[in-house]
Image (spheres, rainbow, N blue to C red):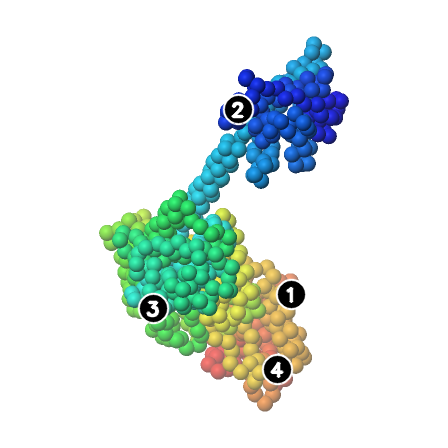
Amino acid sequence: MTDSARQAGDSAIPPLFRFVPGPGGDTGTATRLALNRTGSFEWDLAAGTLDIDEAGLAVFGVDPVAFAARPSIVVERLDPGERARLAVTIDEALTGGSGSYSIHFRVPLPDGARQWTHVQGMIMRSGDGRAHRVVGVVRDATAEVTHSAFVLDLEERRRRQTDIVERTTTALSRAMTVDDVTAALTGPGGLAMLGADGLALGLVEGSTLDIIALSGETLEAFDGPGSGDLDAGLPLGDTVLSGRPRFVTSVPELARRYPVLQPHVDGPGIRAAAYLPLVAHARPLGALALFYGERTDFSADERILYLGLAAIVAQSLQRAMLYDEEREFATGLQSAMLPRRIQAVEGGEIAVRYHAAWSGRDVGGDWYDVVALPRSRVGVVVGDVQGHDTHAAAIMGQLRIVLRAYAAEGHPPATVMARVSRFLAELDTDRFATCTYAQVDLATGAVRLARAGHFGPLVRHTDGRVGSPQVRGGLPLGISTEFVDEEFPETRIDLLPGESLVLYTDGLVEEPGAGLDQGMAALAREVSEGPEGAEDLADHLSARLWERWGAGDDVALLVLRRGPDVDPVRAPRLRQYIHQADPEGLSEARTIVRKALTDWDMAELADDAELVTGELLVNVLLHTEGGAVLTLEVLPEPVRRIRLSVQDRSSVWPRRRAPGETSTSGRGLLLLDAVTARWGIEPRGEGKAVWCEIGPTARRPFGTGRGGGVPHRI
């Protein structure tokens, strides 16, 4: 630091001052110059002197006579902080090689006011770069700084107002329903978006005012959202009835005008409020109240801003209310086309769910149905018409009625699907539909399915495992007829007691941003982890998947559960389906049989039962085109025996052969003769069942049937 700068650090400017009289050399001239509020100075760094003219002294509010007597009075009047800041600025300019410096600082005046003063100096340097002289001006900058601060404050306030409008407009532009509007206003960041500390929103419903949203600190005399009379005794109701905004800057005065608010005045720290009518197309919709804890007034610009906000909210609410009305009508139309009630079925339970998409006002073409069929069977169907509009819903209604009519006549699934496809192709439409239809015999568990471009079913087993049977399918309805390909192959599966069949549409498995395989895996996992009952499982899948995916598509869901075995303690029983393509199924079935007999305290029969199980299942899996249903039960007789049955879909019965010594097959029936008490073959619908009884009783002659069995010579 230079000597002169070091001196400036102590007193902001050198200690030696000289008064330089203005023209004429009298104080009258000084007074006239003071009006200009701009003076000049010259600082000789080498001599350490500073010359200030009369106008400069006037800027500092110093009388030239007092200055002449004690020149340091100029610096002493500055606050220590301002002196230090001035010294640092000068020092940095002098030592840093700068050609000038400029600084604003406050100077206390004799009347107690503080004046903003601006000093600007030009630094003269010698050939070696050393500063030797500074000349400059000093002026009163109070008006300039004050105006600048005012402008900056005004710009900041306008920026905040613009941000409020932009954020509110952006948030409400995405709102579809009235609930969306209230969520945008009261959700996270809602109050900050509006720049308020509290909010109350009420909508007019006839002669009532429905408070649909409260957030933050409010003055409204309501404990929470609800309906009340449209009363002029409350500021929110008065705002609706009068249609005029009210800007409150005195809460006590507000309470005197509306006495019902008196108990609420002392609680929250509210100092101001804006009550804004919500009007759209000359129709009063309600009122919005914004509350503030710090604000004490509303400028003209701010009042205009809040009226604009009220218009934005009113337009959003009107659009949302219209959307809600249209959506309610559309979903009502969709629901009217679906069965109002699902009849109870003997031997099982059925649960259905239909969920309309939350986004979009148009309805979809998803549907479900349950049809009573001849011979105590039941038909279940889930389908989806292309598109999401009233046209799709209308086609859905027609297809549901037509399919129900064809199914009720008792036609097999393939015929039903072909006729419905033909019907759709004859309609004046370019839409197609997908569908899965199943005929179920809950007494036997036989299920016959046909698919038309739709998802196959899932089967939940009694142990919680979930299977996805390979159900062959045809083209979508309508398209199949156009392409002259009305082949809908039927697939048969067997539903064991306690097992559930799950049919669904794509809205349940299409996760946004993920592949279909992920959605299918998630569905299988939730079916496995869900409760056993049909109603409970349907609720579980709706909550865990449809709501989880964001409800962007319609969903039709049907869960059919076959009733579990009755009184398993008195007569224990198990059933197991073994898929033909499951390499572990045979080993698993033998293990299950052994474990069941051990659990039933009949372990002494486990070896024979396991041996027979393997033999019968191998015969089915090798010589038929499908899987097998294994049934094991304890016969309720004085001497307990077990009955083991293996059912398949082949109509070809086993025959006795005479295997040679080196033959590797043909001994199955000989094994049954040797191990079982008796056995037989019974026809079962499209296939047959080979059964046997194992127990301590004397063995019967070969082929002696029991309970409807027929002797066979094989």
Residue located at (30% from left, 61% from top):
241
420 left or right, relative to 541: left
Upstream in the sequence, badge 4 or badge 2?
2
Depth check, mark 2 against mark 1: the one in front is: 2
Upstream in the sequence, badge 3 or badge 2?
2
User: How many numbered callouts?
Assistant: 4
Question: Which residue position is annotated with label 1?
Answer: 661
SS for dot 4: loop
Residue located at (44% from left, 50% from top):
297
The amino acid on which the numbered mark 4 sits, given as a three-letter code, is Gly
Question: Which residue position is annotated with label 4?
Answer: 695
Relative depth, front residue between 182 and 440: 182
Q: Whole-Å distance between the Cαs marked 4 and 1?
A: 30 Å
Q: Residue 229 carries which label?
A: 3
**Farthest bottom residue in view:** 638
* Label 2 Cα crowd, 10 Å radius (few <14 / some 14-19 / many 20+): few
The amino acid on which the numbered mark 1 sits, given as a three-letter code, is Glu
Q: Whole-Å distance between the Cαs marked 2 and 1?
A: 146 Å
The amino acid on which the numbered mark 2 sits, given as a three-letter code, is Gly
The amino acid on which the numbered mark 3 sits, given as a three-letter code, is Asp
Question: Which residue position is annotated with label 2?
Answer: 28
